[in-house]
Amino acid sequence: MVLALILAGCDTPVDPKQISATPASARAFAQAQKAVTICGKNFPKLEKTAVALRAAGFKETTEGQFAGINRMPRFAVMQNSEGDVLVVLGNRSERVCLVGVEDLTPQQAFDLAQPWVRQYVATTNAENGQGLSKSVVQAWRSQDLDRTVFISATKTFPFFDDPGAAVRLIYFD
């Protein structure tokens, strides 16, 4: 399950029924923006990120499919009180912040990723001579001597009952 969440942007066929045509509410989008800002400000320090998310009102989820993940030492799944914004933090060889939003459209996902794109001065896959997987709206990369960052805005996020989308920040030291 955790690997599926982190790799949700791999080149798998996209179910058009999972692409939201109805935008996420202004409230949900604002909460997702808050999560994106917190990840951007605190990465790559995951514990600091989790503390800041808790202070912003996100809590570890006890929902069935995610409850077991929160018992794993290197992963956390948090959600807002309404349950329509989900944040996955992961720490394997890379650190990951994934923010999924119910009813988020692909364009909203693209917009939601922009703070990270600006923060890391990231360039698109096209600018780097690479293509896109079928499941992403856009992907970006930033690299310097100390780290490599991958950012993506996905068309779908299949972990809600309704369609949605997500943004993903992957940070390698």
Image (tube, rainbow, N blue to C red):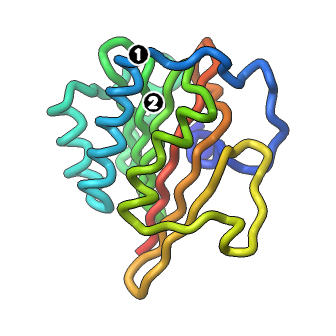
Q: Residue furthest bottom?
A: 145
Residue 24: give x, y in percent of width and height. Answer: 50, 19
Residue 13: give x, y in percent of width and height. Answer: 84, 38
Q: In terms of depth relative to the viewer, which is nearer, 150 or 63?
A: 150
Give the mark nearest the N terminus, 1 or 2: 2
The amino acid on which the numbered mark 2 sits, given as a three-letter code, is: Gly
Q: In terms of depth relative to the viewer, which is nearer, 52 or 75?
A: 52
Query: What residue is pinned by disc 2?
Result: 68
Is residue 171 in view? yes
Q: Quadrant location of the C terminus?
A: bottom left
Asked where in the image residue 135 lies, by quadrant, the reply is top right
Front label number (1 vs 2): 1
Residue at the location (41% across, 87% down)? Answer: 145
Q: Quadrant location of the N terminus?
A: top right
Whether residue 106 is situated above or below residue 8 in the rendered picture: above
The amino acid on which the numbered mark 1 sits, given as a three-letter code, is: Gly
Classed neighbour count for the residue bearing mark 2: other residues with Cα under 10 Å, few (<14), some (14–19), many (≥20): some
Residue at the location (43% across, 28% down)? Answer: 86
Residue 108: give x, y in percent of width and height. Answer: 53, 32
Question: 153 left or right of 52?
Answer: right
Residue 30: give x, y in percent of width and height. Answer: 34, 27
Whether residue 130 is situated above or below residue 50 in the rendered picture: below
Classed neighbour count for the residue bearing mark 1: other residues with Cα under 10 Å, few (<14), some (14–19), many (≥20): some
Residue at the location (49% across, 26% down)? Answer: 101
Q: Residues at badges 1 and 2 in contact (C-beta under 8 Å)? A: no
Q: Residue furthest right?
A: 13
Query: What residue is pinned by disc 1?
Result: 83
Where disc 2 sits, the SS reads loop
